[in-house]
Structures are given as structure tokens and as C-alpha cells.
Amino acid sequence: MNNGMTSESSTPGPSTPTTRYSHAYDQLRSLLLSGSIAPNTRLTEADLTRRFNVSRSTVRAVLVHLTQEGYVTSEVNRGVRTRSFTPEEATDILEARETLESALAGKAAERATEDEIRELRATLHGMARAQAHGDQAAYSRGNRRFHQQVKAAAHQETLARAYATLLYPLVMRQYRNVSAPHPRTGSYEEHQAILLAIVTRNPAAATAAMRHHVATARYALVLGQ
């Protein structure tokens, strides 16, 4: 019998409002981070309702959350749009990433377990194979994995939470030069230097190596536009 309640609120379990909201939020956030939606694209409630099979109220709540986090913007007469960054905003975010990630690398040199170091070695070996075979996609995956592993090996939750708030992936999505050679010259060697500093338990060297690596990537990204 229909009691007037929608499927989002009538049944506990997988179709509860919280679960549907979380699913829609996670899916839209992943789309934004992946670059599947171009910067400054208008997002309409009707389209998102159909895409995620949720109510307009759920979509509205998701968009409010993403606006608060900076993933999208909401303006009168322009609606909700995917975030677009000025070069100055992009530089600020990339500089913040440089500071936070270098600090995380320093902590990883102090706190990484032997298992975590083995995982970093394995990832770096995979990146070397990808580079040798010209597999850009595999190298990029390895690169992302390496940075995530360093962050995890730091065992520093405060720094990690601050890093997670950065909109660095969105900046990359907007400013990356897809026609540029990848990986860029020196990228693999910079990762080697980071790992060596972590393996030798040298926080200062790990901090410096990560700062150099991220700064070099920043210059290539923004100045190359």
C-alpha cells in the first residue's frame, strides 16, 4: 500500500535516505575529481536526480555540501557550476599542497613501518616498468598510489585531514596539459629520492625531496599554461 512516502524514506537498509544521500554525494564527488565534468559546467537538479535515481531534495542537499567544501560554486542567476580556478587560486592550492605533503613525507621517514616501506618500493618498481613500456596510465596510477602511501605512512592524522581538504585534483583537472610528455623528465628520479630518504630514516631529506618534487610539478603545471 502506498502511504505517501517515497522509496528514499519508506524502507530501512540499502534504500534509506542516509545511504542514498551518501551514494549520490560519493558518486558526484568522484565525477568531479576524475575530470569527467569540465570546469564551469552547470549542474542541474533534474539531470542529477535522473543520474543518481534520488529525489531533488537529496540532490539539493548534496550540492549544498559540495558547495561548502568548494567542489562547486553556487551563484544567483548562474546556478550551481563545477569549480573553475584562476591561476592565482591554483597557485595558492598547489603551494599549500607542497607545504603539507613535504611535512607528511618527513613524518613518513620517522614513522613508516617496514611493511609500508616494502609497499612503497613495490609501487616505485611498478612505476619504473610503466615508464620503460611507455604506459602513461599505469605510471599515473603508480604516482597517485605512491603519494597516498607516503601520506598513510606518516601516521599524522591532523596533517592528513588538512591535505584532504585541498582541491588539488580539481586544479590538476583544469590546468593539466594533456599534450605534454608524461611522465615529465625527472619525475621518477624525484620519487626515488623521496623513497631513499624514507628508507634511511632522514626526515629532513624526505621533506626536502618531496618539496622539490611537488614544487617542480607545480611549476610545470601552472607556468606551462
Image: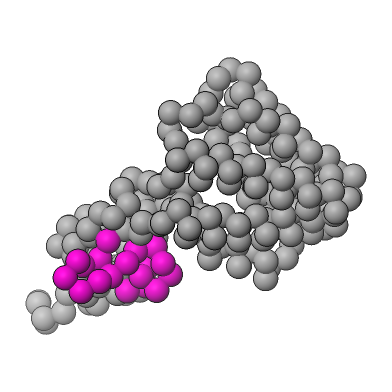
The answer to which of 110 and 91 lies nearer the viewer is 91
Q: Quadrant of residue 14?
A: bottom left
How many numbered discs? 0
Q: Is residue 104 left or right of residue 23?
A: right
Is the C terminus in the top left, top right, bottom left or bottom right quadrant?
A: top left
Q: Position of residue 93 (x, y in %)?
A: 54, 59
Q: Quadrant of residue 99?
A: bottom right
> Is 22 displayed left or right of 223 in the figure?
left
78 drawn magenta: yes
Residue 83 visible at all: yes
The quadrant of the image that shows the N terminus is bottom left
Task: Please say if 122 is above or below 162.
Answer: above
Q: Which residues are magenta?
A: 64-81
The residue depicted at 59 percent of the width and 30 percent of the height is 184
Between residues 31 and 77, which one lies in front from this camera angle?
A: 77
Question: Which residue is depicted at the point 25% across and 54% down?
Answer: 41
Across and down, in percent, residue 104 comes to 72, 58
Residue 17 location in percent, x, y?
30, 74
Query: Is residue 62 in view from this perspective?
Result: no
Q: Residue at x 34, y 64 (%)?
A: 72
Q: As rendered, which of 62 and 4 lies closer to the eye?
A: 62
Residue 126: name its quadrant. top right
